[in-house]
Structures are given as structure tokens and as C-alpha cells.
Image (cartoon, grey):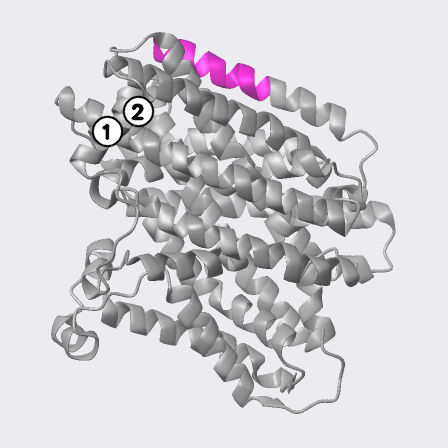
């Protein structure tokens, strides 16, 4: 199918989104933008969160990683299960009891204004970079396989896609994206299932036969028992648990949707439904990766990990329908992760940094401020995508998990200290701890695996001998976020004092 026809489907899909956005944003205000007036349907939230959690990165990087990492990624998914249980039965009751609009206001109630600002700032940093990394990956695929052939430059593609997202989130916010994310998650999952069926048929086998072929190649191995490996199963499970707690439970984007549900019980049902479906869908992506590598091997196809799925789906071997489904599924995976990020970043900046909810300004002035912030984050996303284009990393999911381990650690430490202790903090030293802790975690990670940083940053660190002396071949994996959180916790303990105040 020609690039022009594929592009027309992208435009048609976006028009559908605009219609949904227009319909759902009628009568919107700041409260509906931030938390959907606390009237969101928990089933829609649970389903829509699948698309937000997975994104275009999962759509291409998880299948692409099977060739070198087998099904090891599922170890992280198992960790997610324990993390989501913690969110449902520890964090959500806290958020509902305190009736929060931004979850970071808890830190102010518990520790003071600096803790509040630090938590919000680390969320803004981490979510801005993580969301734009996901955005870059999908734009790059659309660019390589469709838009370059139409003579459309990368910078224009980025501008237009961000403009599209702005158009359908500008007014409605959470109230709108609950519905658009549901639509887009449906598109992504339909595309995933159809692609699996078609590729299995192309291999001349069935589901069980494909599993058997993957097993022969070693792709279906889930647990890595090499203690020194970065993907050792305990590292992945423990790391996955704390990644889920931090990147979902301490993340305004994800929790903004949860606390938009009318009561705690429904919000907990939402989390458990979301968890069950997410585990199944992640396994399907790993299964897809296995059959993609089988197909590539049988047909002498070579491609970079993140390019494997689009290379096969958009090849002349399959009908144009598969190409259309792939593109729709890909942008369906893209938009929920970006629209939710921009909306939550706007909420966080307005409430946590500007304290718009405490302002005495009229509703019209508040709305004008919120729209300016919303536009400002779109501009920031545009600039960061261009930075990722310059870096041009080929396996984005590795970068995202690494960056999350560094930037979400202070959030993990702050919330853990608030929930697990009754101690008060020296408000003036909180920023120092929250900056020093991730820097120490980063240094430890660089010492553990200097080769990874040398490849990503294209520099020579000269730390190999020191790394061997200190770590003896041990490589820090996804447990980095836990290490970071522990360093933050210990730092906060040092600057704390006893208090008889209520345990939050």
C-alpha cells in the first residue's frame, strides 16, 4: 500500500479523535480538566490505562528485545503485579482519604513546601523526558516508513502530531482523554491480535506450533538465573515492583485518572482489572516478538530491534490491510502516552508549582493560565523530540527504564519515608537530599556497567578496571530505582527528627 494511502488513514483516525474530544469536552472547566469532576467510569479508566502504560515503546521495543533478551521482560511484568497491589491497597486509600487533586500535595501536608516542590519537579523532569522518548520512537517509525517517501521532514511531522494532540486535549483534559484513551487502546489491541494471527499463518503453523518453534530457539525462556546479569530474575522482579510503584503509583499522569473515579472501591477495581489485562497484553507482545524473529529468520530479514516489527508489517509480503492496522495500532499506542503526559504535566505545574488551586483569581484567569502552561509543555515536547532525534538511540525502552530508575528514586524515597515513619524533615535540606541521592545512584550504576554508558554517550569513561574491582562483574539492572529510593530514604533519615505527629 502506498505511503499516501497509509497517511490518509492517519488523518482519518485523528478526525475521529477530534470528534470524540469535541463531544466529551462540552461544558468543561478546570476541575474536569484536572480530575474529570471525579465522575469517570472505572471500567473505562482501567481499559484506557492499558494504552497509557504500554505506549508505542512497548509496541515495537518489547517485541524487538526478544531476539537478544528472550522473554526476560516478563520478569519485570511479574514485578509490576506486586507493585500494582501495593498501589491499590496502600497508596490509593491514602490519596482518597486526603481528597487530593495532585498526589504531590501529600508531600506538603506531611513534610512542607520544599518536599512538595521537589516531588512535583522530579515528576515533571521524568515524565517530560520519558514521554518524549516514546513520542520520538513512534514519529521516527512513521517518518522512515511513510513520511520520508512523501517528502515530509521530521521536524514538520513532530510539529503536526503535537498540534493534533493539543487540539483534542486543550479543553477537556482528563474528562476527554478517559474516552480517547479507551478508543485508542482498542485500536492498539485489535492491531496486535490481527498481526499475531497473520504472522502465525505466514509461518504455516498455529499458536502451539509457534510456541514450540520459539522454545527451540530459546526465545520463551522467562527466568534468567545468572546472578551477575542485569536481567537476573530477582533484579527484574524487585525492580519491576518498584518501577510500577514509582512510575504508576507516584506518577501524577496515572494517578490523575485513578482519582478521577468517584470512590476508592471502584478505583481499586480499576487497578486490579488493569493489572490483569496488562500482564496478558505484555505476554502477547513478547509472543509477537518471538514470531517476528522466527519470520525474519525464515525470510532473511535483518533490522534493528525497534525497526523489526514495522519492517515486517509494512513489507510487500503482506496485504495493505496489515500495514493500515499496524499504523493505526502504532499511533493508538502513541497518543495515550503523550496526551496523558501533557495533561498531567499541565495539572502538576498548575497545582504544585503555581498553586493555581489556591489562587483567588477568577475561573477565566485560571483557565487562561492553564492553557498557557499546556501550550508550554507542547513546545517543550517538541524540543525534546529533536534532542532524541540527535541522540538516535535504537532501543528506547532501555533508556526509559534507566532514566526512570534515576529520576523516580527521590519520589519513591519521599513517599516511603512519609508513609513508613512519623519523623519530620528539615525542610531546608530536602532539595539537597533529592539531588545528591540520584547522583550517587547514577555513579553506582556507571561503575557497575560503564560499557552501557560508553555506548549510549559515545565516550570513553575508563572505569572498567574500577568496575571489576568493586562489583566483580555484577551489573545493576532494574533494581536501580530501589537503590536510589533507599539512598534517598537514608538521606531523609539523616535530616529528620522525631515527631509526635500523625502517621499519614
**Residue 317, position as x, y percentages in the image:** 24, 11
Residue 222 in view, yes or no? yes
Residue segment shown in magenta: 1-15
- Which residue lies at the image location 70% right of the left edge and 67% below the top edge? 106
Q: CA distance from mark 1 to mark 2?
A: 6 Å
Q: Is residue 305 magenta?
A: no
Residue 423, located in which quarter of the rendered image? bottom right
- Please state which of residues 392 and 126 is positioned toward the viewer in this rendering: 126
**Image vertical order of residue 197 relative to residue 72, above or below:** above
The numbered dot on residue 427 is none
Which of 48/147 is in front?
Answer: 48
Question: For this view, does 163 lie left or right of residue 231?
Answer: right
Q: Residues within 10 Å of mark 2 (few under 14, many from 20)?
A: few
**Element class at badge 2:** helix
CB under 8 Å between discs 1 and 2? yes
Could you say whether the residue bearing mark 1 is in a helix, strand or loop?
A: helix
Give coordinates of residue 45: x percent, y percent. 66, 38
Q: Position of residue 233 (x, y in %)?
A: 32, 57
Circle 1: is it few (<14), some (14-19), or many (20+) Cα within 10 Å? some
**At 55% across and 29% down in the image, what residue appears?**
185
Q: Quadrant of the N terminus?
A: top left
Q: Nearer the viewer, residue 160 or 345?
A: 345
Furthest toward the bottom, the residue is 498
For the point 50% across and 51% down, the residue is 81
Q: Position of residue 366 (x, y in %)?
A: 79, 50
- Mark linked to residue 208: 2
- In the image, residue 204 above or below residue 219: above
Mark 1, residue position: 212
Please give left or right for residue 499 compared with residue 405 in the image.
Answer: right
Amino acid at each position: 500500500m502506498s505511503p499516501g494511502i497509509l497517511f490518509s488513514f492517519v488523518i482519518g483516525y485523528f478526525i475521529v479523535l477530534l470528534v470524540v474530544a469535541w463531544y466529551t469536552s462540552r461544558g468543561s472547566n478546570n476541575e474536569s480538566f484536572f480530575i474529570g469532576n471525579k465522575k469517570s467510569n472505572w471500567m473505562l479508566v482501567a481499559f484506557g490505562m492499558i494504552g497509557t502504560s504500554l505506549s508505542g515503546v512497548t509496541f515495537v521495543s518489547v517485541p524487538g528485545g526478544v531476539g537478544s533478551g528472550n522473554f526476560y521482560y516478563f520478569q519485570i511484568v511479574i514485578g509490576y503485579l506486586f507493585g500494582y497491589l501495593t498501589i491499590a491497597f496502600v497508596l490509593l486509600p491514602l490519596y482518597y482519604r486526603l481528597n487530593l487533586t495532585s498526589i504531590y500535595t501529600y508531600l506538603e501536608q506531611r513534610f512542607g513546601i520544599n518536599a512538595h516542590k521537589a516531588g512535583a519537579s522530579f515528576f515533571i523532569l521524568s515524565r517530560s523526558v520519558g514521554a518524549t522518548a516514546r513520542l520520538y520512537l513512534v514519529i521516527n517509525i512513521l517518518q522512515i516508513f511513510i513520511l520520508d517517501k512523501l517528502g515530509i521532514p521530521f521536524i514538520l511531522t513532530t510539529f503536526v502530531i503535537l498540534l493534533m494532540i493539543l487540539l483534542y486535549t486543550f479543553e477537556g483534559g482528563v474528562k476527554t482523554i478517559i474516552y480517547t484513551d479507551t478508543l485508542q487502546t482498542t485500536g492498539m489491541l485489535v492491531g496486535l491480535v490481527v498481526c499475531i494471527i497473520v504472522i502465525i499463518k505466514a509461518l504455516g503453523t498455529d499458536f502451539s506450533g509457534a510456541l514450540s518453534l520459539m522454545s527451540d530457539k530459546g526465545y520463551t525462556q522467562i527466568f534468567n538465573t545468572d546472578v551477575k546479569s542485569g536481567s537476573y530474575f530477582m533484579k527484574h522482579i524487585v525492580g519491576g515492583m518498584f518501577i510500577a510503584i514509582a512510575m504508576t503509583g507516584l506518577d501524577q499522569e496515572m494517578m490523575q485518572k485513578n482519582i478521577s473515579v468517584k470512590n476508592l472501591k471502584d478505583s481499586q477495581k480499576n487497578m486490579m482489572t488493569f493489572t490483569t489485562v496488562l500482564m496478558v497484553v505484555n505476554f502477547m507482545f513478547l509472543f509477537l516478538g518471538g514470531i517476528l524473529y522466527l519470520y525474519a529468520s525464515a525470510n532473511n530479514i535483518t533490522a534493528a530491534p525497534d525497526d523489526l516489527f514495522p519492517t515486517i508489517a509494512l513489507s510487500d509480503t503482506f496485504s495493505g490491510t496489515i500495514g493500515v492496522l499496524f499504523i493505526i495500532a502504532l499511533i493508538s499506542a502513541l497518543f495515550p502516552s503523550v496526551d496523558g503526559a501533557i495533561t498531567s504535566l499541565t495539572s502538576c505545574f498548575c497545582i504544585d508549582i503555581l498553586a493555581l488551586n489556591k489562587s483567588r483569581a477568577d475561573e477565566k484567569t485560571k483557565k487562561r493560565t492553564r492553557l498557557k502552561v499546556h501550550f508550554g509543555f507542547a513546545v517543550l515536547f517538541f524540543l525534546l523530540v529533536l534532542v532524541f532525534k540527535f541522540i538516535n538511540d535504537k532501543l528506547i525502552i532501555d533508556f526509559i527504564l534507566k532514566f526512570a530508575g534515576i529520576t523516580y528514586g527521590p519520589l519513591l524515597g519521599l513517599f516511603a519515608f512519609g508513609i513508613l515513619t512519623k519523623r519530620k524533615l528539615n525542610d531546608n535540606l530536602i532539595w539537597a537530599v533529592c539531588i545528591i541521592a540520584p547522583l550517587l545512584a547514577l555513579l553506582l550504576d556507571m561503575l557497575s556497567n560503564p560499557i552501557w554508558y560508553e555506548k549510549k554517550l559515545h565516550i570513553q569513561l575508563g572505569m572498567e578496571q574500577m568496575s571489576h574491582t568493586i562489583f566483580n562483574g555484577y551489573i545493576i539492572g532494574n533494581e536501580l530505582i530501589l537503590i536510589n529510593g533507599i539512598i534517598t530514604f537514608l538521606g531523609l533519615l539523616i535530616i529528620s527528627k522525631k515527631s509526635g505527629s500523625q502517621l499519614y
